[in-house]
Image (cartoon, grey):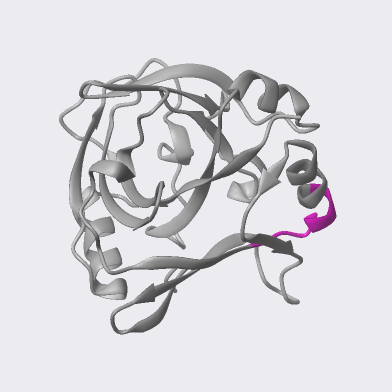
Amino acid sequence: MSRCYLDHITVTAPTLAAGVAWVERTLGAAMRPGGEHPRMGTHNALLELGEKLYLEVIAVNPEAAKPDRPRWFDLDAPDPARPVRLAAWIARSENIRVTAAASPVPLGEIGSMSRGSLEWLITVPRDGRPPMDGILPALIQWPEGVHPADTLPASGCRLVRLEGFHAEADKARGVLQAIGFEGEYSVTAPAAGGRAGLLAHIQTPGGVRRLDFPG
């Protein structure tokens, strides 16, 4: 069985500036410029969270051409109630095709992506929406010996725990087991009246802070 591991968490926002401001205000740490994703018409900023682990803020790039397909992370149809939020997470695999084939729930089509000189493989659903409201991961495979977090300066922040909440928590846990996920991630049903979503607990110089979705 192929194994996969938590690679990064993704905050979506109506603009990159809005997402960066929210993360920096919440965590008290400065984000670093990322780059542009020509195939998706998006751009991002990054924050190191540990060895081979980082946080990404991603938004539509207003200066890029609109892609001929839905953008990833549901950026074409944002949730108006949660304009800036922790929307998705990405699991790293050494063999993305084997890992994707093991999932009983489709995680998306495998395609190549790029940002500057960096290229990788990633799963993206045809409609651009993260699987099971972002509770299940996108899969990613970096070139051997390459990882974006290796080039990021230390932020003083560390991911302590990632939680997912979904009415079909048992189904999500079954998928994670099937794809061989190993890491600190738990999925449970939301409280009565709650909705699906992600919650990250992050250790910062100012204490443990939470990233979920602002009200």
Q: Position of residue 18 (x, y in %)?
A: 23, 58
Instruction: Classify residue 195 as left or right of residue 33.
Output: right
Query: In the displayed image of the protein, which residue is found farthest to the bottom?
Result: 207
Q: Is residue 130 above or below residue 63?
A: below
Residue drawn at 40 percent across, 75 percent down:
203
Residue drawn at 46 percent across, 58 percent down:
86
For residue 126: magenta? no
Residue drawn at 45 percent across, 26 percent down:
70
Q: Which residues are magenta?
A: 164-171
Q: Is residue 106 above or below residue 43?
A: above
* Residue 138 appears in the figure: yes
Q: Is residue 9 above or below residue 125?
A: below
* Residue 212 appears in the figure: no
Instruction: Classify residue 162 as left or right of residue 103.
Output: left
Instruction: Classify residue 209 as left or right of residue 34.
Output: right
Q: Quadrant of the N terminus?
A: top right
Residue drawn at 32 percent across, 45 percent down:
149
